[in-house]
Amino acid sequence: FRLVDLEFDVDWHTRRNMLRLNIQTDFLTRRVRNEIAFGYIERKTTKNTSFEMARFEVPQHRWLEMGEDDHGLVIVNDSKYGFSAHHSEISLSLLRGAIYPDFFSDEGKHHFEFRLIPHDGDWKPVALRHGVSFNMMIPAIHGRIRNPMGILKELFEISENPVLSSLKKRYDSEEVVVRFYESRGERTKLNIKKGMFRSNILEDELEPAGSCEIFRPFAVRTFIYKPLK
């Protein structure tokens, strides 16, 4: 991918001001998309109503995307979650000099990074892949790893969608909890190789899972695996 990395080091001691990064594009669009928990949302970039005019900024998670049908721009961040978009301009909230309720809000030294990725065609693989890789960089460790995917390849056919969100021990036992979510707003499936049980966010055991579990758009599904003792 073609990309531009932006790194900022700021020593912030300002009051009653806000630092923003404005990015002007030439896209003809009325919408911007950004990641939220377990999915993404489309937002308007117009100021036609009193509600739109009053919306100073909106939250995002790891990425946002603006563009037309066949090309656009993905912006990935590592720690800045407020932005606004007006027509073809994107404004990222960086630092605040607020005086209430915390007079020393954002005081001191900061380091944060962004990545700009122009894209052609479908934006979803670009945004989702870079959103994860930019925030979860894999450290290089000298040595050998035996069976790096381990239990996952034994249990599932791994693909880019649905996305693995959690892999952990169950809160009250040695059983394994695995959680996936559908990230693209599309219907998809997860092929299961070994016997699993469907569960919920509270990790309650529900009923046996099938060999092929269907995910509706933005669905969050939790499974429990009981290893043989």
Image (cartoon, rainbow, N blue to C red):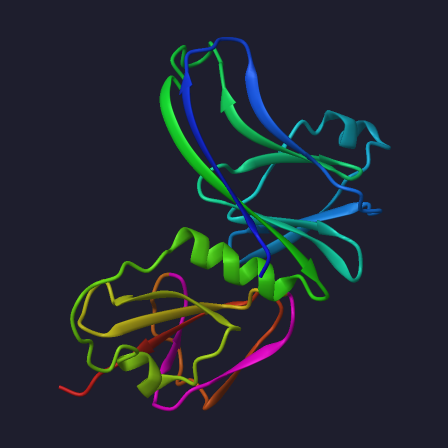
Q: Quadrant of residue 217?
A: bottom right
Q: Is residue 78 left or right of residue 34?
A: left
Q: What residue appears at the point 80 percent right and 46 percent down from the top-left corner?
A: 27
* The C terminus lies in quadrant: bottom left
Residue 121: give x, y in percent of width and height: 73, 66
Q: Is residue 140 one of those drawn in magenta?
A: no
| Closer to us: 124 or 213 | 124
| Closer to us: 70 or 3 | 3
Q: Is residue 188 one of those drawn in magenta?
A: yes
Q: Is residue 212 above or below residue 113?
A: below
Q: Is residue 9 above or below residue 60?
A: above
Q: Is residue 112 above or below residue 166?
A: above
Which stretch did the figure color magenta?
185-201
| Closer to us: 163 or 126 | 126
Q: Is residue 34 left or right of residue 161?
A: right
Q: Is residue 150 above or below residue 220?
A: below
Q: What residue appears at the point 50 percent right and 20 percent down from the top-left corner?
A: 96
Q: Is residue 218 left or right of residue 211?
A: right
Q: Quadrant of residue 194?
A: bottom left
Q: What residue appears at the point 84 percent right and 31 percent down from the top-left corner?
A: 49
* The N terminus lies in quadrant: bottom right
Query: Number of labelled discs?
Result: 0
Residue 170: give x, y in percent of width and height: 25, 67
Q: What residue appears at the point 67 percent right and 59 percent down from the top-left corner?
A: 119
Residue 86: give x, y in percent of width and height: 76, 34
Residue 218: give x, y in percent of width and height: 58, 64
The furthest residue to the left: 229
